[in-house]
Image (cartoon, rainbow, N blue to C red):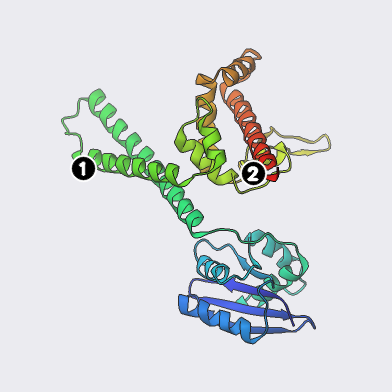
């Protein structure tokens, strides 16, 4: 009887290890293609693996998505996609330092048996929304770099009186990127049709785009406390102390997605300038002598507490 299945994913293949109740393993390798995923399902059925058996994969960029999505669509409810850091911790605990695809698959199967792992709950609409947000993040970065280079060119030409025409191609590229960014922003807003997104958009100072992006990251996740949601956004402080010898300066951990953090800061600035409640809070912190950046961090945390409050209110409404 199978108790867990480990799937070590690479670009071209997926190594499989089925862990049985008696401690033995059955292994195989399948191509990381649609046909390979279908063959894998037949392989599982032939060996009596139930729909509830944990099927554990590492998150490997896009390479794990084909098998994970195919298995989920086939109603395998035990699909688990985990952070590779967890696997490394398990591997370090082993005396024998061996790393192969087969061994990695066995480690994943052991984790599926021993650990309580979260289920893979990504659907195709959510995956597409994530791709839109990732593409917007990259376009914003490119636009910022090209814009800075063009401004530097203009300033240098004016200061040094250089007889050089402004590169028309650069301006055309920037305009094209701006059009694509606006189109992506519209799609992101239209497809993030959640209660949290609508409630955040009602807050004066938060744009619809930022409300949709923050909702994407926060709506489906559960947070037990404000410390958890602050840590998820990377706005918690790191502490480095050792007796009386080390007293380092406390800094933001900056864990999590930097694009989410950017949108939180943009929203914090917006509410600090246009929302009476947050503006009063920001001015109070400034009056206490804090740097404006420190004040914005405080406003960002206050905004995260409001998001946590909205999520709890929505949960209460659905439970009634």
Point 60% across, 26% down: residue = 299
Q: For residue 101, what is the image quadrant?
A: bottom right
In the displayed structure, 213 sits above or below 296; it is: below
Point 47% across, 79% down: residue = 35
Single out the mark in the foreground, 2 or 1.
2
Q: Whole-Å distance between the Cαs marked 2 and 1?
A: 41 Å
Judging depth in this view, the residue of 20 and 238 nearest the camera is 20
Q: Check disc 1: other Cα within 10 Å, few if <14, some if 14-19, many if 20+.
A: few
Quadrant (top left, top right, bottom left, bottom right) of the N terminus: bottom right
Point 63% across, 87% down: residue = 46
Q: Is residue 249 left or right of residue 66?
A: right
Q: Is residue 159 left or right of residue 258?
A: left
Quadrant (top left, top right, bottom left, bottom right) of the C terminus: top right
In the displayed structure, 93 sits above or below 165; it is: below
Q: Which mark is residue 169?
A: 1
Residue 142 in the image, given as x and y percentages of width and height: 37, 44
């Amino acid at each position: 009887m199978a108790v867990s299945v480990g799937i070590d994913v690479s670009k071209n293949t997926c190594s499989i290890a089925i862990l049985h109740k008696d401690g033995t393993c059955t292994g195989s390798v399948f191509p990381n293609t649609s046909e390979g995923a279908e063959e894998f399902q037949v392989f599982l059925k032939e060996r009596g693996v139930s729909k509830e058996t944990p099927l554990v994969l590492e998150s490997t960029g896009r390479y794990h998505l084909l098998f994970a999505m195919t298995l989920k669509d086939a109603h395998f409810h035990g699909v688990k996609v985990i952070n590779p850091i967890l696997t490394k911790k398990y591997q370090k605990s082993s005396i024998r330092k061996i790393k192969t695809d087969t061994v990695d698959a066995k480690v994943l199967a052991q984790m599926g048996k021993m650990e309580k792992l979260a289920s893979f709950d990504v659907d195709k609409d959510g995956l597409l929304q994530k791709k839109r947000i990732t593409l917007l993040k990259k376009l914003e970065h490119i636009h910022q770099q090209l814009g800075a280079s063009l401004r530097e060119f203009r300033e240098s030409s004016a200061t040094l009186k250089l007889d050089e025409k402004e590169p028309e191609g650069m301006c055309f590229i920037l305009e094209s990127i701006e059009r694509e960014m606006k189109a992506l922003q519209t799609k992101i807003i239209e497809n993030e049709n959640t209660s949290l997104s609508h409630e955040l958009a009602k807050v004066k100072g938060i744009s619809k785009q930022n409300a949709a992006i923050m909702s994407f990251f926060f709506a489906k996740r559960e947070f037990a406390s404000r410390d958890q949601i602050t840590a998820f956004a990377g706005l918690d402080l790191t502490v480095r102390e050792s007796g009386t010898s080390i007293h380092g300066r406390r800094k933001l951990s900056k864990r999590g997605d930097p694009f989410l953090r950017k949108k939180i800061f943009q929203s914090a600035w917006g509410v600090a300038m246009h929302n009476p409640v947050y503006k009063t809070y920001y001015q109070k912190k400034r009056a206490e002598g804090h740097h404006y950046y420190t004040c914005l961090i405080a406003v960002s945390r206050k905004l995260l507490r409001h998001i946590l409050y909205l999520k709890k209110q929505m949960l209460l409404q659905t439970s009634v």
